[in-house]
Image (cartoon, helix red, strand yellow):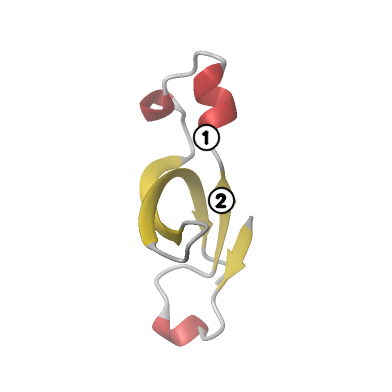
Amino acid sequence: MFEWAKDLSTNDKDIVFVLNPQLFIDAGVDPEKVEGWVFAKVSAEDEDKKPIEVDKFLKPFNIK
């Protein structure tokens, strides 16, 4: 997934690449040791539109 700030003056990052870490975890990678990416919980919705938190790899960039 790729996210971007609609208003650069009100966001702390301009763009963020987002990856599902499960493929890497299933292959034996320790997600806490992946360099260059942040392993974090992200708010999302399940199939019933209920709020949940899911694991993601995040790579934020500032283009200024």
Q: Is residue 62 above or below residue 55?
A: below
Residue occupied by mark 2: 18
Closer-to-camera residue (31/15): 31
Q: Residues within 10 Å of mark 2 (few under 14, many from 20)?
A: some
Secondary element type, mark 2: strand
Task: Please give left or right for residue 51 compared with residue 21 in the image.
Answer: left
Q: Quadrant of the C terminus?
A: bottom right
Q: Where residue 30 sits in the image (x, y, percent)?
A: 42, 20
Secondary element type, mark 1: loop
Residue furthest right as drawn = 1
Q: Quadrant of residue 51?
A: bottom left
Closer-to-camera residue (48/40): 48
Q: Quadrant of residue 3?
A: bottom right
Amino acid found under the numbered disc labelled 1? Pro
Q: Quadrant of the N terminus?
A: bottom right
Residue occupied by mark 1: 21
> Which residue is rendered at x = 36% and y = 28% of the image?
32
Disc marking residue 35? none
Q: Residues within 10 Å of mark 1 (few under 14, many from 20)?
A: some
> Which residue is rendered at x = 53% and y = 70% of the image?
14
Q: Where residue 37 sits in the image (x, y, percent)?
A: 48, 40
Closer-to-camera residue (47/52): 47
Amino acid found under the numbered disc labelled 2? Val
Q: Is residue 46 above or below residue 36?
A: below
| Mark 2 → mark 1, Cα distance in angstroms | 9 Å
Q: Is residue 54 above or below residue 46?
A: above
Q: Where residue 35 sits in the image (x, y, percent)?
A: 46, 31
> Which residue is rendered at x = 47% and y = 44% of the image?
56
